[in-house]
Image (spheres, rainbow, N blue to C red):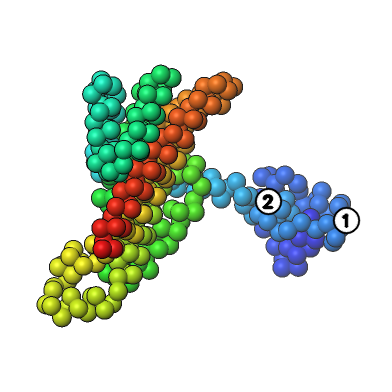
Amino acid sequence: MAAYESVFNLFGLTEWCESGTKKALLSLKSLKKAEANWWEIPFPSLDTLHKACAAIPQSRDLTASLEDGFLYVRPTLRFVLDPVTQPLSWMLESALNVFTSVPWWVLMPVLLIATQFASKSWRISGFVAMCLVFFLVTDHYVFAMQTLSIIFVCTVLCVVLGIPTGIMMARSNTFQRMLIPVLDMLQTLPTFVYLIPLIFLFKITEPKLYGLAIILYAIVPVIRLTDLGIRLVDKDVIEAANAYGMNSRQLLFHVQVPLAMPNIMAGVNQTIMMSLAMVVIASLVSAPGLGTLVLDGINNLRLGVGFMAGIGIVLLAIILDRVSKSALNRVNKTYSN
Protein backbone atom coordinates (compact mmCIF):
# COMPACT_ATOMS: atom_id res chain seq x y z
CA MET A 1 0.00 0.00 0.00
CA ALA A 2 2.93 2.29 0.72
CA ALA A 3 3.92 2.05 -2.93
CA TYR A 4 0.59 3.51 -4.03
CA GLU A 5 0.82 6.15 -1.30
CA SER A 6 4.10 7.33 -2.79
CA VAL A 7 2.42 7.66 -6.18
CA PHE A 8 -0.24 9.94 -4.71
CA ASN A 9 2.47 11.94 -2.90
CA LEU A 10 4.39 12.28 -6.17
CA PHE A 11 1.41 13.98 -7.83
CA GLY A 12 0.66 16.13 -4.79
CA LEU A 13 -2.64 14.41 -3.97
CA THR A 14 -1.98 13.75 -0.28
CA GLU A 15 -4.43 16.37 0.99
CA TRP A 16 -7.12 15.19 -1.43
CA CYS A 17 -6.67 11.62 -0.25
CA GLU A 18 -6.75 12.62 3.41
CA SER A 19 -10.05 14.43 2.83
CA GLY A 20 -11.78 11.08 2.69
CA THR A 21 -9.87 9.39 5.49
CA LYS A 22 -13.01 8.88 7.56
CA LYS A 23 -14.35 6.43 5.00
CA ALA A 24 -11.06 4.59 4.58
CA LEU A 25 -10.36 1.20 6.08
CA LEU A 26 -6.72 2.29 6.69
CA SER A 27 -5.48 5.84 7.17
CA LEU A 28 -2.43 7.31 5.49
CA LYS A 29 -0.63 7.49 8.83
CA SER A 30 -1.00 3.78 9.35
CA LEU A 31 0.06 3.11 5.79
CA LYS A 32 3.30 5.05 6.30
CA LYS A 33 4.35 2.54 8.90
CA ALA A 34 4.09 -0.31 6.42
CA GLU A 35 7.05 -1.09 4.25
CA ALA A 36 6.48 -1.55 0.54
CA ASN A 37 6.90 -5.15 -0.61
CA TRP A 38 7.27 -4.78 -4.36
CA TRP A 39 7.10 -8.54 -4.93
CA GLU A 40 3.68 -8.85 -3.32
CA ILE A 41 2.26 -5.55 -4.49
CA PRO A 42 -1.45 -5.96 -5.35
CA PHE A 43 -3.11 -4.87 -8.55
CA PRO A 44 -4.34 -1.26 -8.28
CA SER A 45 -8.05 -2.09 -8.12
CA LEU A 46 -10.57 0.34 -6.69
CA ASP A 47 -10.59 -1.34 -3.27
CA THR A 48 -6.79 -1.44 -3.14
CA LEU A 49 -6.44 2.23 -4.09
CA HIS A 50 -9.18 3.16 -1.63
CA LYS A 51 -7.05 1.76 1.19
CA ALA A 52 -4.19 4.06 0.13
CA CYS A 53 -6.41 7.02 -0.76
CA ALA A 54 -9.78 7.24 0.92
CA ALA A 55 -11.07 9.75 -1.66
CA ILE A 56 -11.13 7.03 -4.33
CA PRO A 57 -14.44 5.13 -4.33
CA GLN A 58 -14.68 1.43 -3.60
CA SER A 59 -16.08 -1.21 -5.94
CA ARG A 60 -19.16 -1.36 -3.75
CA ASP A 61 -19.76 2.35 -4.42
CA LEU A 62 -19.85 1.58 -8.15
CA THR A 63 -22.35 -1.27 -7.80
CA ALA A 64 -24.44 0.79 -5.38
CA SER A 65 -24.66 3.60 -7.92
CA LEU A 66 -25.87 1.12 -10.54
CA GLU A 67 -28.54 -0.12 -8.14
CA ASP A 68 -29.60 3.42 -7.29
CA GLY A 69 -29.80 4.30 -10.98
CA PHE A 70 -31.93 1.27 -11.74
CA LEU A 71 -34.27 2.02 -8.84
CA TYR A 72 -34.51 5.62 -10.06
CA VAL A 73 -35.73 4.62 -13.53
CA ARG A 74 -37.82 1.67 -12.27
CA PRO A 75 -41.14 3.61 -12.01
CA THR A 76 -40.73 4.92 -15.56
CA LEU A 77 -39.87 1.47 -16.91
CA ARG A 78 -42.87 -0.06 -15.16
CA PHE A 79 -45.14 2.67 -16.54
CA VAL A 80 -43.92 1.93 -20.08
CA LEU A 81 -43.62 -1.87 -19.91
CA ASP A 82 -46.67 -2.79 -17.84
CA PRO A 83 -49.25 -2.13 -20.61
CA VAL A 84 -47.03 -3.89 -23.17
CA THR A 85 -46.29 -6.98 -21.09
CA GLN A 86 -49.64 -7.41 -19.35
CA PRO A 87 -51.10 -9.44 -22.27
CA LEU A 88 -48.27 -11.93 -21.69
CA SER A 89 -49.55 -12.49 -18.14
CA TRP A 90 -53.07 -13.00 -19.45
CA MET A 91 -51.89 -15.48 -22.07
CA LEU A 92 -49.87 -17.49 -19.55
CA GLU A 93 -52.69 -17.54 -17.03
CA SER A 94 -55.21 -18.61 -19.68
CA ALA A 95 -52.94 -21.37 -21.01
CA LEU A 96 -52.27 -22.66 -17.49
CA ASN A 97 -55.99 -22.66 -16.78
CA VAL A 98 -56.83 -24.56 -19.99
CA PHE A 99 -54.08 -27.16 -19.68
CA THR A 100 -54.83 -27.90 -16.02
CA SER A 101 -58.62 -27.61 -15.92
CA VAL A 102 -59.49 -29.71 -18.97
CA PRO A 103 -59.97 -33.38 -17.89
CA TRP A 104 -57.10 -35.71 -18.69
CA TRP A 105 -59.33 -37.97 -20.80
CA VAL A 106 -60.07 -34.97 -23.07
CA LEU A 107 -56.64 -33.37 -23.20
CA MET A 108 -54.69 -36.58 -23.78
CA PRO A 109 -56.42 -37.44 -27.09
CA VAL A 110 -56.00 -33.83 -28.22
CA LEU A 111 -52.26 -33.96 -27.50
CA LEU A 112 -51.91 -37.32 -29.25
CA ILE A 113 -53.78 -36.07 -32.32
CA ALA A 114 -51.55 -32.97 -32.42
CA THR A 115 -48.48 -35.20 -32.09
CA GLN A 116 -49.58 -37.45 -34.93
CA PHE A 117 -50.42 -34.45 -37.12
CA ALA A 118 -46.98 -32.88 -36.53
CA SER A 119 -44.83 -36.00 -36.69
CA LYS A 120 -46.82 -38.39 -38.93
CA SER A 121 -45.22 -41.17 -36.90
CA TRP A 122 -47.17 -43.78 -34.94
CA ARG A 123 -43.99 -44.68 -33.08
CA ILE A 124 -43.58 -41.15 -31.72
CA SER A 125 -47.29 -40.95 -30.90
CA GLY A 126 -47.04 -44.22 -28.98
CA PHE A 127 -44.03 -42.93 -27.04
CA VAL A 128 -45.93 -39.74 -26.17
CA ALA A 129 -48.89 -41.83 -24.97
CA MET A 130 -46.61 -43.87 -22.69
CA CYS A 131 -45.03 -40.71 -21.27
CA LEU A 132 -48.45 -39.21 -20.54
CA VAL A 133 -49.47 -42.40 -18.76
CA PHE A 134 -46.26 -42.20 -16.73
CA PHE A 135 -47.13 -38.63 -15.70
CA LEU A 136 -50.62 -39.75 -14.67
CA VAL A 137 -49.43 -42.76 -12.67
CA THR A 138 -46.75 -40.79 -10.80
CA ASP A 139 -49.07 -37.80 -10.11
CA HIS A 140 -46.86 -35.51 -12.19
CA TYR A 141 -49.49 -34.91 -14.87
CA VAL A 142 -50.62 -31.48 -13.63
CA PHE A 143 -47.02 -30.28 -13.22
CA ALA A 144 -46.13 -31.55 -16.69
CA MET A 145 -49.12 -29.78 -18.22
CA GLN A 146 -48.17 -26.55 -16.46
CA THR A 147 -44.68 -26.76 -17.91
CA LEU A 148 -46.06 -27.62 -21.35
CA SER A 149 -48.50 -24.69 -21.30
CA ILE A 150 -45.73 -22.20 -20.49
CA ILE A 151 -43.53 -23.63 -23.25
CA PHE A 152 -46.43 -23.44 -25.71
CA VAL A 153 -47.15 -19.75 -25.04
CA CYS A 154 -43.51 -18.66 -24.98
CA THR A 155 -42.59 -20.64 -28.10
CA VAL A 156 -45.52 -19.20 -30.06
CA LEU A 157 -44.51 -15.67 -29.07
CA CYS A 158 -40.86 -16.36 -29.91
CA VAL A 159 -41.88 -17.56 -33.38
CA VAL A 160 -44.28 -14.66 -33.95
CA LEU A 161 -41.66 -12.10 -32.91
CA GLY A 162 -38.50 -13.91 -34.01
CA ILE A 163 -39.26 -14.82 -37.63
CA PRO A 164 -40.19 -11.25 -38.71
CA THR A 165 -37.11 -9.97 -36.86
CA GLY A 166 -34.92 -12.48 -38.69
CA ILE A 167 -36.47 -11.48 -42.02
CA MET A 168 -35.73 -7.82 -41.28
CA MET A 169 -32.12 -8.73 -40.44
CA ALA A 170 -31.78 -10.63 -43.71
CA ARG A 171 -33.14 -7.71 -45.75
CA SER A 172 -31.10 -4.98 -44.02
CA ASN A 173 -27.39 -5.23 -43.30
CA THR A 174 -27.59 -2.14 -41.11
CA PHE A 175 -30.31 -3.65 -38.95
CA GLN A 176 -28.31 -6.88 -38.72
CA ARG A 177 -25.20 -5.04 -37.52
CA MET A 178 -27.29 -3.26 -34.89
CA LEU A 179 -29.01 -6.39 -33.62
CA ILE A 180 -26.12 -8.87 -33.58
CA PRO A 181 -24.52 -7.39 -30.40
CA VAL A 182 -27.89 -7.64 -28.64
CA LEU A 183 -28.32 -11.26 -29.72
CA ASP A 184 -24.77 -12.07 -28.65
CA MET A 185 -25.47 -10.60 -25.22
CA LEU A 186 -28.73 -12.53 -24.85
CA GLN A 187 -27.05 -15.75 -25.96
CA THR A 188 -24.07 -15.49 -23.62
CA LEU A 189 -25.74 -14.18 -20.47
CA PRO A 190 -26.02 -16.83 -17.72
CA THR A 191 -29.59 -17.99 -17.30
CA PHE A 192 -29.89 -16.70 -13.75
CA VAL A 193 -28.83 -13.20 -14.82
CA TYR A 194 -32.04 -12.84 -16.87
CA LEU A 195 -34.03 -12.96 -13.63
CA ILE A 196 -32.17 -10.19 -11.75
CA PRO A 197 -33.52 -7.05 -13.50
CA LEU A 198 -36.96 -8.61 -13.96
CA ILE A 199 -37.26 -9.29 -10.22
CA PHE A 200 -36.65 -5.60 -9.54
CA LEU A 201 -39.01 -4.56 -12.32
CA PHE A 202 -42.04 -6.78 -11.73
CA LYS A 203 -43.74 -8.46 -8.80
CA ILE A 204 -42.61 -12.02 -8.24
CA THR A 205 -46.23 -13.22 -8.45
CA GLU A 206 -46.72 -11.84 -11.97
CA PRO A 207 -46.50 -14.50 -14.71
CA LYS A 208 -44.93 -12.02 -17.12
CA LEU A 209 -41.79 -12.04 -14.96
CA TYR A 210 -40.83 -15.59 -15.89
CA GLY A 211 -42.50 -15.28 -19.29
CA LEU A 212 -40.21 -12.43 -20.34
CA ALA A 213 -37.16 -14.29 -19.03
CA ILE A 214 -38.06 -17.37 -21.09
CA ILE A 215 -38.77 -15.36 -24.26
CA LEU A 216 -35.55 -13.33 -24.04
CA TYR A 217 -33.55 -16.51 -23.49
CA ALA A 218 -35.22 -18.65 -26.17
CA ILE A 219 -35.89 -16.20 -29.01
CA VAL A 220 -32.28 -15.95 -30.21
CA PRO A 221 -32.06 -19.21 -32.26
CA VAL A 222 -35.17 -18.55 -34.33
CA ILE A 223 -33.97 -15.03 -35.17
CA ARG A 224 -30.47 -16.12 -36.13
CA LEU A 225 -31.52 -19.14 -38.19
CA THR A 226 -34.25 -17.21 -40.00
CA ASP A 227 -31.69 -14.59 -40.98
CA LEU A 228 -29.21 -17.30 -42.00
CA GLY A 229 -31.78 -19.29 -43.99
CA ILE A 230 -32.89 -16.32 -46.09
CA ARG A 231 -29.32 -15.20 -46.73
CA LEU A 232 -28.39 -18.71 -47.90
CA VAL A 233 -31.00 -18.73 -50.67
CA ASP A 234 -29.22 -19.21 -53.99
CA LYS A 235 -28.68 -15.92 -55.80
CA ASP A 236 -29.44 -17.60 -59.12
CA VAL A 237 -32.91 -18.46 -57.82
CA ILE A 238 -33.45 -14.85 -56.77
CA GLU A 239 -32.30 -13.60 -60.18
CA ALA A 240 -34.68 -16.01 -61.89
CA ALA A 241 -37.57 -14.77 -59.71
CA ASN A 242 -36.71 -11.18 -60.56
CA ALA A 243 -36.61 -12.11 -64.25
CA TYR A 244 -40.19 -13.36 -63.95
CA GLY A 245 -41.21 -9.94 -62.63
CA MET A 246 -41.72 -10.75 -58.96
CA ASN A 247 -41.81 -7.79 -56.59
CA SER A 248 -39.98 -7.84 -53.25
CA ARG A 249 -43.01 -9.12 -51.34
CA GLN A 250 -43.65 -11.98 -53.75
CA LEU A 251 -39.93 -12.81 -53.74
CA LEU A 252 -39.95 -13.01 -49.95
CA PHE A 253 -43.07 -15.10 -49.40
CA HIS A 254 -42.95 -17.30 -52.51
CA VAL A 255 -39.21 -17.90 -52.86
CA GLN A 256 -37.02 -16.92 -49.91
CA VAL A 257 -39.17 -18.00 -46.95
CA PRO A 258 -40.10 -21.42 -48.45
CA LEU A 259 -36.47 -22.17 -49.28
CA ALA A 260 -35.36 -20.99 -45.83
CA MET A 261 -38.02 -23.07 -44.05
CA PRO A 262 -35.63 -25.91 -43.02
CA ASN A 263 -33.40 -23.42 -41.22
CA ILE A 264 -36.40 -21.66 -39.70
CA MET A 265 -37.78 -24.97 -38.38
CA ALA A 266 -34.36 -25.80 -36.92
CA GLY A 267 -34.51 -22.49 -35.09
CA VAL A 268 -37.99 -23.32 -33.79
CA ASN A 269 -36.70 -26.66 -32.51
CA GLN A 270 -33.88 -24.95 -30.62
CA THR A 271 -36.30 -22.34 -29.26
CA ILE A 272 -38.56 -25.08 -27.86
CA MET A 273 -35.68 -26.81 -26.10
CA MET A 274 -34.31 -23.56 -24.68
CA SER A 275 -37.78 -22.64 -23.43
CA LEU A 276 -37.94 -25.92 -21.52
CA ALA A 277 -34.51 -25.30 -20.00
CA MET A 278 -35.49 -21.80 -18.86
CA VAL A 279 -38.87 -22.92 -17.46
CA VAL A 280 -37.07 -25.15 -14.96
CA ILE A 281 -34.80 -22.30 -13.84
CA ALA A 282 -37.72 -19.85 -13.74
CA SER A 283 -39.25 -21.94 -10.95
CA LEU A 284 -37.04 -19.81 -8.70
CA VAL A 285 -39.38 -16.88 -9.46
CA SER A 286 -42.71 -18.69 -9.04
CA ALA A 287 -42.97 -20.36 -12.47
CA PRO A 288 -45.19 -23.42 -11.96
CA GLY A 289 -44.47 -26.87 -13.33
CA LEU A 290 -41.94 -29.63 -12.91
CA GLY A 291 -39.25 -27.12 -11.97
CA THR A 292 -41.01 -26.43 -8.65
CA LEU A 293 -40.62 -30.11 -7.72
CA VAL A 294 -36.92 -29.98 -8.56
CA LEU A 295 -36.57 -26.85 -6.43
CA ASP A 296 -38.47 -28.53 -3.60
CA GLY A 297 -36.16 -31.52 -3.77
CA ILE A 298 -33.09 -29.27 -3.57
CA ASN A 299 -34.36 -27.03 -0.77
CA ASN A 300 -35.68 -29.83 1.43
CA LEU A 301 -33.16 -32.55 0.47
CA ARG A 302 -35.95 -34.73 -0.91
CA LEU A 303 -33.97 -36.88 -3.32
CA GLY A 304 -36.93 -38.92 -4.58
CA VAL A 305 -39.07 -35.88 -5.40
CA GLY A 306 -36.26 -34.15 -7.29
CA PHE A 307 -35.23 -37.33 -9.10
CA MET A 308 -38.74 -38.15 -10.31
CA ALA A 309 -39.28 -34.56 -11.43
CA GLY A 310 -35.97 -34.74 -13.29
CA ILE A 311 -37.12 -37.88 -15.10
CA GLY A 312 -40.33 -36.05 -16.04
CA ILE A 313 -38.34 -33.12 -17.45
CA VAL A 314 -36.17 -35.51 -19.48
CA LEU A 315 -39.25 -37.25 -20.90
CA LEU A 316 -40.86 -33.92 -21.76
CA ALA A 317 -37.64 -32.79 -23.46
CA ILE A 318 -37.51 -36.01 -25.52
CA ILE A 319 -41.16 -35.58 -26.56
CA LEU A 320 -40.68 -31.98 -27.68
CA ASP A 321 -37.41 -32.77 -29.44
CA ARG A 322 -38.71 -35.83 -31.32
CA VAL A 323 -41.94 -34.18 -32.43
CA SER A 324 -40.26 -30.96 -33.58
CA LYS A 325 -37.44 -32.83 -35.36
CA SER A 326 -39.95 -35.08 -37.09
CA ALA A 327 -41.81 -32.00 -38.31
CA LEU A 328 -38.45 -30.54 -39.42
CA ASN A 329 -37.65 -33.67 -41.44
CA ARG A 330 -41.02 -33.45 -43.17
CA VAL A 331 -40.32 -29.83 -44.08
CA ASN A 332 -36.89 -30.75 -45.43
CA LYS A 333 -38.37 -33.49 -47.60
CA THR A 334 -41.10 -31.18 -48.86
CA TYR A 335 -38.75 -28.41 -49.98
CA SER A 336 -35.98 -30.68 -51.23
CA ASN A 337 -38.25 -32.33 -53.80
Q: Which mark is residue 47?
A: 2
- Give the residue displayed 34% in from the left and 29% down from the top: 129
Question: Which residue does the numbered mark 1 point to in the structure image?
Answer: 35
Q: In the visual, does 194 lie left or right of 244?
A: right
* Label 1 packing within 10 angstroms: few (<14), some (14-19), many (20+): few
Quadrant location of the N terminus in the rendered image: bottom right
Quadrant showing the C terminus: bottom left
Amino acid on which disc 1 is placed: Glu
Badge 2 marks a residue whose secondary structure is helix
- Residue that appears at 30% across and 48% down: 327
Which residue occupies 45% across, 27% down? 292
**Residue 50 x/y as whole percent:** 69, 52
- 130 over 37 or under it: above or below: above
Q: Nearer the viewer, residue 197 or 96?
A: 96
**Residue that lies at the very extreme toward the front in this rendered image:** 122
Instruction: Note whether residue 34 is visible.
Output: yes
Question: Picture coordinates of residue 106 (x, y %)?
Answer: 23, 24
Vertical side of 255 occupied by 325: above or below: above
Q: Nearer the viewer, residue 91 or 33?
A: 91
The Cα–Cα distance between marks 2 and 1, rounded to whole angstroms, is: 19 Å
Tag 1 secondary structure: loop
Please report the residue visible at 51 percent of the width from the left and 47 percent of the height from the top: 190
Query: Which residue is at the front of the view, 130 or 195?
Result: 130
Number of numbered discs visible in the structure rendering = 2
Three-letter amino acid code at disc 2?
A: Asp
106 sits left or right of 277 in the view: left
First in sequence: mark 2 vs mark 1: 1
Q: Residues within 10 Å of mark 2 (few under 14, many from 20)?
A: some
Is residue 203 visible to the viewer in this orientation of the structure?
no
Which label sits in the foreground, 2 or 1? Answer: 2
Horizontal and vertical percent position of residue 208:
33, 37
